[in-house]
Amino acid sequence: MKSSLNITKELKMAKETSISELKEAFNIIAHEIKREYNAHIWLIEVFGKRHSYIAGCKDDSFLPPEVIYINEKYAVVSSDWGKLPLEKKEELFSLLNKYVNKT
Amino acid sequence: MLAVLTKKERDWVQSVVKEEEIERYMRNGRDFIDDDEIWEKLRNNKKPDKKKIEDIIQKSMEIQTLEPDETACLLNIEDPEIWHQLFDVAKNIKKKVYDNRIVTFAPLYCGDLCVNNCLYCGFRRENIVIKRKRLTLEEIRRETEVLAGEIGHKRLIVVYGEHPSTDAAYIADTIRTIYDVKVKTKNGYGQIRRVNVNIAPMSIDDLSLLRDVGIGTYQVFQETYHHETYKKLHPEGTLKAHYQWRLYCHHRALEAGVDDVALGALFGLYDWKFEVMGLLYHTRDLERQFGIGPHTISFPRLEPAANTPFIQQTRYKVSDEDFKKIIAVIRLSVPYTGMILTAREPAYIRREVIPIGITQTDASTKIGIGAYSDRYTDQEEDRQQFLLGDTRSLDEVIRELAQMGYITSFCTAGYRCGRTGDRIMSLLRTGREAVFCKLNAVLTFKEWLDDFASFETKAVGEVVLKKEMEEIKEKLPQNVYEKLLEYYKRIENGERDLYF
């Protein structure tokens, strides 16, 4: 019983580390995208209807938000997807997929 | 329900509190409410000078949370003229942060079984005159069909007694049931889009379960922040007697990832100035530990309840005049927060205090268990926690708000697109959230007028909509206005749930 509890704790800690890595990486990416394309993006964690903010831009451009899901747990939201070249968008999601799979 | 706990109830009560989920947030083994310090602040800030008040007002207008000394100054104002000035400032702050919209919602009571024995509560365990019931999921579905399909609500607050039969697993089931209901309406469909919860303090694991089903706001009122009074009103040996388990439940919710939490105090249990200070200290501790303050603050006054003599006996009843002061001081002290005024209050009070800074209110309210689908119209003491002051329909309330120049909003967009936690805090503090409030108020009000409004309300409502659209055209970028027009037309054609 004791050993099983420790494993749970360690798994939780490992998960928290991965999430904090993901947040840190996303903040850098969001900053770069805003600087280069004036596009605001932010990362959310999905809990049913609740889409909780976890990283990225805190500002946006007053247009309807569009949610793009990375997987069933995470998504990226922006009102400015149109400002991003297609290949940048693909590059972004390919990178995020790698991070998200670690969480 | 028996007056004495059954073995099953006793075992459940023993299992709820997790001391380690309290201690981790405390400093040197103490909670953040120091009763003596609060009284000292109130004593030391008597007769504040005009310059000091002006500086405090300036700080509030910059949407900054006040220091305890500053709030104590405001609470000690004696000059009626300065109070009038404060009411105006409160109104302006609300407009700056949330524009002129009032969000509406309805409470849905799902169960009144309770293991506690709080002296002021109609649902207390020993109150034998109350009929006890827990709604089945089928009954929850029927209640939701009335709320979403006939009245037109989009946002609920679900309420439960603290009891093993309404534990986190049951609450999660009821929320899933509510979210699943979709009802055809005149021109579109009705659906509950945000379920907030008013429930007992829970462990992080239980809160995670609720987070996973997508709850909106987690609302728990401390009732009273005064330790000694809390102890007197919540008998020893009951679950609710644990002051700190309750005090830190919002901390646990934030840790569990529910990043919209709501505070409140029940005014009439202890000195109102002390309670306002308690709400401020609570806010400041959440901000300090998580960077996120309360999504909303509530300030209900005690109302009569069946077989509950305490309510007549309390010496801390709050007058209407002091009630206005409470609202203004909270608005200035925590300028970014949402403020909820409920149908506990009679219509004439609602009319008077809504302009001081209220952001949310309920209507067509029924608080008896199963009352919406039973369609009873009178209040029934033996199935309600307390008696309501305002039983007007949503249609009547919306019409009155429109006549007062307010737009009723059914917006639930924020928590569905990541405007939560410290992101919403940033948008609120900079006044940018007010733009989303305005845009989404227009769209959701249009939906409601098309689907549910009476002829008279629709006529008054459309005048408000026209004015709002003109203001948006004038103040916001052209592309935003054009998108709004596009969505507006799509709603006219029967599409629903379009938002910014």
Image: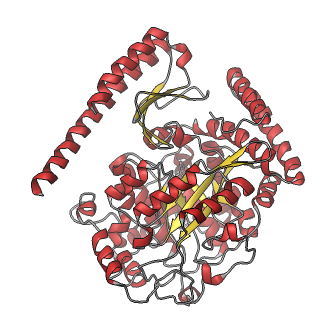
B97 with respect to B401 (left or right): left
Q: How many marks?
A: 0
Question: Which image quarter holds the C terminus of chain B?
Answer: top right
Q: Position of residue B182 (x, y in %)?
A: 65, 48
Residue drawn at (66%, 35%) of the image: B498
**Is B93 above or below relative to B125?**
above
Q: Position of residue B486 (x, y in %)?
A: 74, 26
**Is B140 above or below relative to B6?**
above
Chosen colour scheme: secondary structure
Which residue is more in the foreground, B403 or B482?
A: B482
B199 with respect to B122 (left or right): left
Q: Quadrant of residue B381?
A: bottom right
Q: Position of residue B8 (x, y in %)?
A: 33, 79
Which residue is more in the foreground, B51 or B85?
A: B85
B441 with respect to B267 (left or right): right
Residue A24 at least partly seen: no
**Is B303 above or below relative to A66?**
below
Q: Quadrant of residue B39?
A: bottom left
Residue drawn at (77%, 55%) of the image: B398
Residue B124 at least partly seen: yes
**Is B392 above or below relative to B453?**
below
Which residue is more in the foreground, B462 or B267?
A: B462
Which residue is more in the foreground, B52 or A75?
A: A75
The extreme front residue here reads: B138
The extreme left residue here reads: A3
Q: Position of residue B160 (x, y in %)?
A: 50, 68
